[in-house]
Amino acid sequence: MTTPNPELIQHRIIELEVEHRDLDAVIDAFILSARPDELQLRRLKKRKLQLKDHITLLRMQLVPDVPA
């Protein structure tokens, strides 16, 4: 298995963080709407959590393994 390129990982993290922030803004606007669709709101929040988890996994790849 090849070692992932840290620059590519960092670039992907930035892309996902932007999407995460955008979703945050969409969720806030959605909540403020007159009658928010609860199913759609749950889907947006689930996607936001998935993005956060993916960002965390990518960040873990950037940390070198330290022998015990």
Image: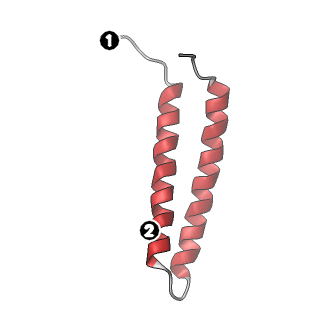
Q: Front-most of 7 and 41? A: 41
53 versus 24 height, above or below: above
The residue that appears at 44% across and 17% down in the rendered structure is 65
Residue 38 placement: quadrant: bottom left
Residue at the far top in the pictured view: 67
Query: SS for tag 1?
Result: loop
Badge 1: how crowded within 10 Å, few (<14), some, or many (20+)? few
61 versus 64 height, above or below: below
Q: Which residue is the site of mark 2?
A: 42
The residue that appears at 52% across and 49% down in the rendered structure is 51
Q: Front-most of 26 and 39? A: 39
Taking 34 as reference, is 65 left or right?
A: left
Q: Is there a contact, CB below 8 Å, between mark 1 and mark 2?
A: no
Q: Which quadrant does the C terminus fall into?
A: top left
The residue that appears at 41% across and 14% down in the rendered structure is 66
Badge 2: how crowded within 10 Å, few (<14), some, or many (20+)? few
Distance from Cα at disc 1 to Cα at disc 2: 41 Å
Image coordinates of residue 43 in percent, x first then y, are: 47, 65
Q: Which residue is the site of mark 1?
A: 68
Residue at the far front in the pictured view: 1
**Mark 1 or 2, which is nearer the eye?**
2
Residue 33 placement: quadrant: bottom right
Taking 9 as reference, is 68 left or right?
A: left
The residue type indicated by label 1 comes to: Ala
